[in-house]
Image (cartoon, helix red, strand yellow):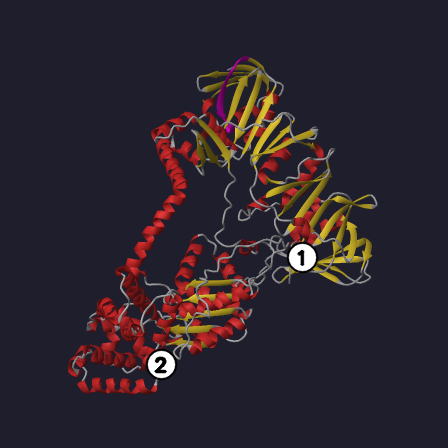
Amino acid sequence: MPLTQKNSLPNLSLTLFLNGKCVLVDNSDLLSLEELWKAVLDQIELSISKANFVTWFKNTSILSLENGKVIIGVPNGFAKEWLENKYNHYLLRAFHAAQREITEIHCQITPDKPITPAFPRESIRTLDAIQRPSLDGFLRKKLVETPIVRPQLEFSQEKPHITNLNTRYLFENFIVAENNELAKAACYAVSQNLGTIYNPLFIYGGVGLGKTHLLQSIGNEISQRFPEKKIKYITSERFTTELIDSIKNQKTDQFKEYYQQMDLLIIDDVQFLSGKEKTQIEFFHIFNALYQLNKQIVISSDRPPKAIATLEDRLRSRFEGGMIADISRPNLETRIAILEAKAHERNIPIDEQSIRFIAEHITQNIRELEGALNRVHAFSEFHKIPTTLAVTTRVLEQLIENNRKSIKSEDIFRVIIDYYGVSEENLIKKGRKKEIVHSRQMIMYLLRNELQMSLASIGSALGGRDHTTVLHACEKIEKGLHENIRLKEEINTLKERLYYDTCG
Amino acid sequence: MKLICTQENLSRSITYLERITGKQSTLPILSNILIEAENGRLKLSATNLEIGVVVNIGAKIEEEGKITIPAKLIGSFIHNLPSGDILNLQTDQVSLIIQSSQYEGKIKGMDGKDFPIIPCFQGAEYPFVFPAQLFRNALSQILFCVSQNESRMELTGVNVSFEEKSLYLAATDSFRLAEQIFELPYKTQSAQSFIIPSATCQELLRIITSESKEVFVAVEENQVFFEVDGIKIVSRLIHGKYPDYKQIIPTSFLSTYQMKRDELIRAVKITSVLSSYNAGEITIRFSVGAPECSIEAVSQEVGQNKARVRIENQSGEDTEKIFTFNPRYVLEGLNALKGEYVVFHINNATSPVVLREMEGENEKLQYLYIMMPVRK
């Protein structure tokens, strides 16, 4: 799980300083050659025309500089001749101005850098005429039905493929507890039976509870066991950006084909697709294509598919068609176990009481838990004192204070409106549609329990309702909490959004 | 500068040069031709910074000097002059004055000293000498296979490799491949291979005439130098590793069919009418014991048709085989092949099909065309 850098600042700055020093020593030559060439180019740019400058100095660099003899890397023979014979005096003058006395200038042709296509090659290759012709005119349908046409002549070649996976996330270092055992079991099962058992797999849970860890673990497990499988981990936000780019460059076909050739596609934070209709359509087609070929799809979100507002129904029903597993907030024991594991993993000396203190006070999310641990560790390291309960209390005092930011009734309204996708007007208006009633009751419950507002003022805030209505709502939710785990989770998510401002 | 030369010489040289000028817009001078009179020779050069061409022609030099003139202008002027004319060329500050028997022109140009220097081969002797006619034929038979897709730079050129006394030229766009082998009169000392950009090959095809004897070749520092009939060409090479194409050429075949090339061309042309030419597909069917193969195309929108082509000769396994091809690839391959007969070497519908030409009774092994059936 990623470190919260903010919290480990003292420690970090020290290492940075040390590292920074090392880096400087190691690369000083390289850096100065680059800078020198930049200075020289700046000089030359002033003395020759723009067209000449661009033509002759594009893709040039200093390859070496020794005893007043400089070797300049140029892209082609023309530039070599030109710099050596025509521009040598400009170069000499510019080097002189940059405080480097040069007596000889030589050019060497360096091969042009290979062009990296926006999408890996095979996706482009399949675009050519071997694509089976679409006789009926339903191009899109065809693309989905026969998404992957293999290249015609199969040259063996290494294709670089970017999976976006972080190898730190493994099943082995995921701490299983009752809050996440179903999700972990589902993910593990998927990694053992790719595409055949739970497809798609939908994992949801709050911020910092380990969704990304689980998702990436599947990818890492597969890439270890079957290196030839094509794996892609991508956040839905990045997915959208790529799609927009491909539309801009008129390469949507390549975009689609690129994704349709994956054996395992992992989309993180899918709730951000909400409201982006075009992205949803493209995702839908990619989803279908992969699904039909029994390719595994894994999706994560911060809430169940039902609760993602403005998600197209066809996508929602598909998300719900596979396996849905949730990760809820860890209980105290789990939090302690996580802290102990982290402390052990990173060799942080810390006593049990301190761990218990952190676990008791940081309840909302695991990432923060780790951040708190880092902070305590950094503090004691910096001041060279052992980590005791007193130190921990002192360090975390402020953090815990900050955690409870003050909220107002407007915040609750905003969160509810955003979460349920209802309008404020509907909440206040009379109306007994089921979804409106539920969100209205939720808002009453939150106003009552989080802001301790009086029943009467809650009633008037919601369009002059009677205080008994409010009371009924609060009681109903209260009762539901004991019977319905999903409702509890819903309240938790809402609270989290309220206090941590993580609305998407 | 002051000189006298013939219209034919000047016009011919300009045709070699004007094609490569004017494609790059950053430097205006690149759309010009450099005309130099020095050491008793008239030298004309043009470049787009990827290819450079230098032509030397005979002329009577009265005064040395140089100037650059827009290629289009001087080309249109010189080409239309009556052949056999003797031309007087003279510079006047930044203009070139051309006088013939009946015509006189003054074209504004730019100073010659700003023209890019075209790299020349510095060595004493070119390391390779290719027989010009063989080289030209080989290029013309394979160049159409070069990939147009810039995402795989290494396939956008013709690969040149050597083995013992043989020279291998190959081009592929990863759907089909053409290879031509010819013997060099001597053993090459180096085992290097390089990729020549297709534009350079096009230029070579135009410059090598049917009278040319030898093509001198040298490779140095990512550049390739050619010299044909006193015309020098320099070009960048494509950087990258050419795929090891030899591994995909099948070495054994289940069946072999020999057919008349022109009949086959006609059949493919006719059938492809009813499958849209570019993206459509045609089916070639070899049936058990049948004296002919059938070529079919079916289009739900346009219609369908069927052609039969007699099999002249057959060997190997006699089973029913059905292949689907992109008609363009079949047609281009058949057109590149020479001779009356063509041989199909086939295995199954998912492995490459090899086409070769016949020379008398035997198969000619120098040229090879491979295409993949479309997978259903």
Q: Looking at the image, do the residues carrying marks 1 and 2 touch, with CB atoms under 8 Å apart?
A: no
Chain containing the residue with disc 2: A
The percent coordinates of residue A435 (x first, y second) are 32, 79
Mark in front: 1 vs 2: 2
Residue B354 spot, x, y in % from top left: 72, 52
Identify the residue shown where x is 63% and y is 55%: A154
- Depicted B277 relative to depicted A481: above or below: above
Judge by depth and name the residue closer to the eye, A312 or B41.
B41
- Mark number, residue A403: none
Q: Is residue A421 visible?
A: no
Which image quarter holds the C terminus of chain B?
bottom right
Task: Say which chain tag 1 marks.
Answer: B
The answer to whether A446 appears left or right of A330 in the picture is: left
Query: Label 1 is placed on what type of residue?
Result: Pro
Q: Which residue is mark 1?
A: B373
Dot 2 corresponds to which residue? A486
| Residue B99 on image: x %, y % | 53, 16
**SS assignment at label 1:** loop
The relative height of residue B368 versus residue A228 in the rendered view (above or below) is above
Residue type at mark 2 is Arg
Q: Secondary structure at mark 2?
A: helix
Q: Is residue A163 above or below residue A191?
A: above
Where is residue A325 drawn, in percent x and y?
Answer: 43, 77
Relative to A91, is B233 on the left or the right? right
Magenta-colored span: B62-72
